[in-house]
Image (tube, grey):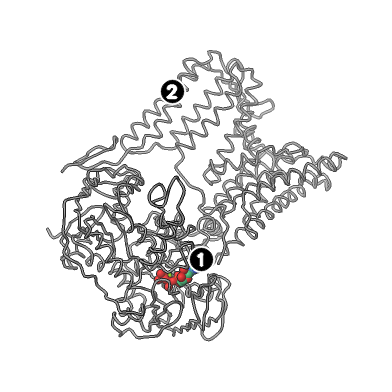
Amino acid sequence: MSTVMNAANAETELGRVAPPRNWKTPIVLSVLALIVFVAFGIFGDARDVAFSWSSDGDAIMLPDVVVNARVLGWVSGVIMIIVALWSFWLANSRRSTPVWGSMLSGFLFLASLIGLVGAGGRAPVVFLLTGAIALSSPVIFGAIAGIIGERVGVVNVAIEGQLLAGAFTSAFVASLTNNLWAGLVAAMIAGALVSMVLAVFAIRYVVDQVIVGVVLNGLVIGLTNFLYSTVLTKDSQNFNFPGTFDFLPIPFLSDIPVLGPVLFDQRITTYAMFLLIPTAWYFLFRTKWGLRIRSAGEHPLAADTVGINVNRMRFWTVTFAGMIAGFGGAALTLGSSNAFVREMSAGQGFIALATVILGRWNPWLAAVAALLFGFSRNFRIWAGQSGSTIPSDLIAMTPYLVTLIAVAFLVGRAVGPAASGKPYLKS
Amino acid sequence: MKLELRSITKRFGSLVANDKISVTVEPGQIHCLLGENGAGKSTLMNVLFGLFQPDEGQILLDDQPVSFAGPGDAMAAGIGMVHQHFMLVPVFTVAENVMLGHEPTRGLGRIDLAEARRQVREVSERFGFEVDPDALVGELPVGIQQRVEIIKALSRKAEILVLDEPTAVLTPQETDELMVIMRQLAASGTSIVFITHKLREVQEVADTITVIRLGKVVGETSPTSSAHELATMMVGRDIGLTVAKNPPTVGKAALSVSGLTMFARSGVRLLDDVSFDVHEGEVLAVAGVQGNGQTELTEALLGLGERVFGSAKLYGKELVGASVRTVLDNGVGYIPEDRTVDGLVAEFSVAENLMLDRSFAGEFVSQHTIKFSKLDEFARSAIAEFDIRTPGPAAPAGKLSGGNQQKVVLARELSRDLKLFVASQPTRGVDVGSVEFIHERIIAVRDSGVPVIIVSTELDEVLELADRIAVMYRGRFIDIVPADTPRSVLGQLMAGVTAA
Ligand SMILES: Nc1ncnc2c1ncn2[C@@H]1O[C@H](COP(=O)(O)OP(=O)(O)OP(=O)(O)O)[C@@H](O)[C@H]1O
Ligand SMILES: [Mg+2]
């Protein structure tokens, strides 16, 4: 039997064409390994870096771990090379690399990057992680609002506006009533109202959703700016001094070194974010409402023919998503800065929009992407302070680069909801 | 439940799709709707199902007038429907599609997936349908999607069941199973409206028959009428039901396929070392139970498949690994199995759809600009020749009836110079009058010396067109046999039994 081939990676096995191999993961892993080995190891900074795990007043103090940054790069590089080789071997025998292998490599990459930047000083691990969470919190709220919206078929470009509306309203209402909870509720209502405007125009009047979103963002920015300068600044003691939620350390858990301060000594808004990610995922992918929402975003006519009222479903789901984004706005004020500032959402709604796509419309992945963004911003702040010789802009770029590589090559492929952004009209 | 449609009128603009149609279905009856493509059958059923609002007329259930604002209301009233163009979410699994809208839950709205799977298995076993509840619908061939669509309707236990061309892509055995189920359901009191273009099925299963032409009821008849009588009543003129065909004048081998292999993402072999030749002037029909690699075979030849290895040479030019455009430029005409997904752009006009594959160059384009008058002229002649029922060349293709959409695809592919013609389910949903014409056209293509590959689940069609028959089983050609092979032998081959 003759077998003709015209692809390089097909080979004959008992005269038959064998299944193709997938080299993507091993290639990406080896590139990362080589960067670490060469740039952070061989040519890395030869000074020591002290990884610190605790801050003063922690229940359990861990001693700093001092290592040589170049040695760290070396060792990480070697381990990563071994992982990459293992991945090549797996690919050759047509098996895929387990996720933890890629995660180990990613972790070592970050660790040696931190080592390189912190060389000659300290690398405050807790600060880096808590800061990442704090900075990504509003983005995660926004991203989950965006995911829910797109899953039901409405592209929500107005996340930025919803965050801002939430931030403004929460600060204002909490100051007026002297009640943070009232501020939180008001923020959710504000977010929902912005969503409702979007939904009415997009669903009822069939205006292009992206355009409505962009207009709404402009509207909310203008409105909050106007109210800020005419009302809030007049008497900021009474109108823009809401206070913040207290830190709520969870007994015992918050005493765990590193993890304690990062995960279990946070404000209520951050805990809500922690809970929101699995809840949103569960809701979308494990409940009947989630199934119906996704059907409306994928094939609204099919959803209609099984008795789902697509447009009503879209309206309320988007409104609900707006509440989540509004909550995220409150996290900016009541959960962090204690006052509203002009345009304080500062583009985080757009970052959220990006993480929706990078996160493949999945709450977990979007949260990871948002955390990477948060980490990058925080990392840059720290790199600027640490006095590293490497230009901080260059450093700031790397985590984004890693995110892009990870998304492009390691995360399986996924396409967005098919009917997202398309109005559903009946004849 | 008794169903009465009283004088239903439905207009689309100036087109009257249903003109005072009255139909009564008694409880436990199987009522067949017969009619040409575009006669208004699906429209009538969509009115019944609440998808369209009637302009005039009334729907009565057990003599009570009802009105449905949407399908939800119709379903609540006990109506179930199998749609001609499947209403399935491609990225959902079979189980998710079947349960959508009536999900079994385990508290807190949590979906009970085990129960949903069980329901799918239960219904599919009753049918002798083999369907994997966890398969993604979008990855299934149309024949299996059809089964899913039927399972979905049956899992809801409707009192009135509408079946809009459920058998268009089923194999004869599956159709028989379905007809057994229909009789069982009817015996237990379900009223069934059954739409099909296959007269054998009508004669076998119908209690009463209503014939519709151009939106009007032209008469009722009983299943004792002969196929010829039914066809004549439907079309309004005398038609022959078989194609007179000369023996082929076979030339040299034009397409040689060797070692064609295609893998799923998982590494499973979808096509397994397929080798064959097709000669000039012959029709090779590919028969087999759906899901044995027929879809993948046509996709691989067209350059649509991924992970395809081996070779397929058309007059020495390699098709494997070439882009779809190169394949088309080499003169390959292609009828995809699913017209709504791969055959048409629903929002484009009929005329635009007729020139889709000629948008780069050719008679309709000069200097990157479409020559509209030329296109219009061509579209009008194609519409006339293929008897496409459309308000005009500018009507959006998605608004045509199913059979007429199919004719648009056929007209496009058959109206250019071909070196190879590959067609999957070419006459899916096409009425008897037009099937005759299309078969003649395919034979004419063959007689002009073009090699033809036909994939069909319809054994009658295979036997009518084929000069040789290849039977596919589990991604392989298990045998290539002459056209006069008895049905029983073919049936055995399809089940994977070789004569040896
Ligand atoms: N949504 C729509 N908008 C405009 N015209 C439509 C629409 N749906 C159907 N039509 C027109 O109504 C007529 C009847 O179509 P219908 O789908 O009911 O035919 P059918 O009898 O089911 O044909 P087939 O056997 O091909 O499925 C056709 O001329 C079609 O073009
Ligand atoms: Mg129809």
**Amino acid at dot 1:** His
Mark 1 and mark 2: span between their CA atoms? 54 Å
Question: Tag 2, which chain?
Answer: A
Please state the horizontal and vertical placement of residue B284, each as a whole percent of the image.
22, 58
Residue highlighted by disc 1: B102
For residue A27, above or below residue B174: above
**Amino acid at dot 2:** Leu
Which residue: 40% across, 65% down? B383
Which residue: 35% across, 75% down? B181
Q: Is mark 1 within 8 Å of ligand 2?
A: no
Q: Looking at the image, can residue B154 be seen?
A: no
| Residue A152 relative to residue B486: left or right | right
User: What is the count of numbered marks?
Assistant: 2
For residue B151, above or below residue A284: below
Mark 1 vs mark 2: give the one in front: 2
Q: Secondary structure at mark 2?
A: helix
Please state the horizontal and vertical placement of residue B419, each as a whole percent of the image.
26, 52
Residue highlighted by disc 2: A34
For residue A119, above or below residue A250: above
Please state the horizontal and vertical placement of residue A163, each as a whole percent of the image.
69, 44
| Residue B174 relative to residue A290: left or right | left
Q: Nearer the viewer, residue A88 or B22?
A: B22
Residue A33 is labelled as none
Q: Badge 1: few (under 14), some or many (20 or more) residues near its Cα, within 10 Å? A: some
Q: Nearer the viewer, residue B31 or B234?
A: B234
Q: Looking at the image, can residue B465 be seen?
A: yes
